[in-house]
Image (cartoon, helix red, strand yellow):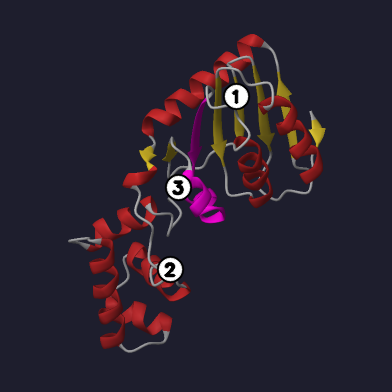
Amino acid sequence: MTHTDAEVTAETLDRLIGRARRSVNVALTGSAGYVEAVLRRLVQVPSGVTVRVLCNPAALDVAPARLRSLPTVRVLRHELCGIVVVDGMSAFLRLGNEGAADERAAVVTDRAAVSTLQLLYAGAWSRGRRLVDHPEPSPRLRSELTRRILEQLRSGRTDATAAGALQVSLRTYRRHVAEIMRELEASSRFQAGVRAVELGLLHETR
């Protein structure tokens, strides 16, 4: 277990993924450095190796085009831990909170521990949604105003209260809500909230 930086992460991933002979299972978080390091190495994996990539919406935001170019990618809207499991025999595991000063990582080679990580990955993978079925939100849906309106909808505030909080007229607020629901293809405000979480526009409440 060591303190990590971009160089250490890249070197470690090069060493582990470079040994792959059968499979590479990856879970990507929204850390740009980690996502970039993994994707750079994956393009060099031999064609006979099975590669599966599971990412959350934040990771998808980092490199959407490259992730969409990979053959087997799924999106899971829950928080993920950064993991790379190679051939079911070794693993790279990111530890700690995103961006923490003491961010660390572990290289795991104990067979029982790697087997457990593989099982956890398989469970998360089974709940993931195929990337081809995960629509890319429009720039309008990614705007700061849309995020604030979605937060107001989730809080359950009345339209008048929400419009006041956003400092817009009631008519303008309702127009924005209607446009958001139309783009999300939602028939109710509750459904709009669910779709917003699925697309990573809102974080899931706990």
x, y percent for residue 22 = 55, 17
| Nearest to viewer (mark 3 / mark 1) | 3
Q: Residue at x 36, y 39 (%)?
A: 130
The disc placed on residue 85 is 1
Residue closer to the observer: 96 or 17: 17
Q: Residue at x 26, y 87 (%)?
A: 171
Residue for badge 3: 68
Q: Is any part of residue 87 visible from this angle?
A: yes
Q: Residue at x 70, y 51 (%)?
A: 99
Overall secondary structure of the magenta section? helix
Instruction: Let me know if residue 62 is in the magenta part.
Output: yes
Judged left or right of residue 41, residue 184 is left
In the rendered structure, are the residues bearing label 3 and label 1 in contact, judged by CB atoms less than 8 Å apart? no
Instruction: Let me know if residue 154 is in the magenta part.
Output: no
CA separation in Å, label 3 and label 1:
21 Å
Q: Secondary structure at mark 1?
A: strand
The amino acid type of the residue labelled 2 equals: Arg
Give the mark, 3 or 1, whose residue is nearer the N terminus.
3
- Position of the N terminus by quadrant: top right
Looking at the image, which residue sits at the far front? 47
The disc placed on residue 147 is 2
Q: Quadrant of residue 94?
A: top right
Looking at the rendering, the stretch of residues picked out in magenta corresponds to 50-69
x, y percent for residue 170 = 28, 86
Looking at the image, which residue sits at the far top? 111
x, y percent for residue 180 = 30, 70
Judged left or right of residue 146, residue 100 is right
x, y percent for residue 195 = 31, 55
| Nearest to viewer (mark 2 / mark 1) | 1
Q: Quadrant of residue 38?
A: top right
Residue closer to the observer: 157 or 131: 131
Circle 2 packing at 10 Å, graded few (<14), some (14-19), many (20+), is some
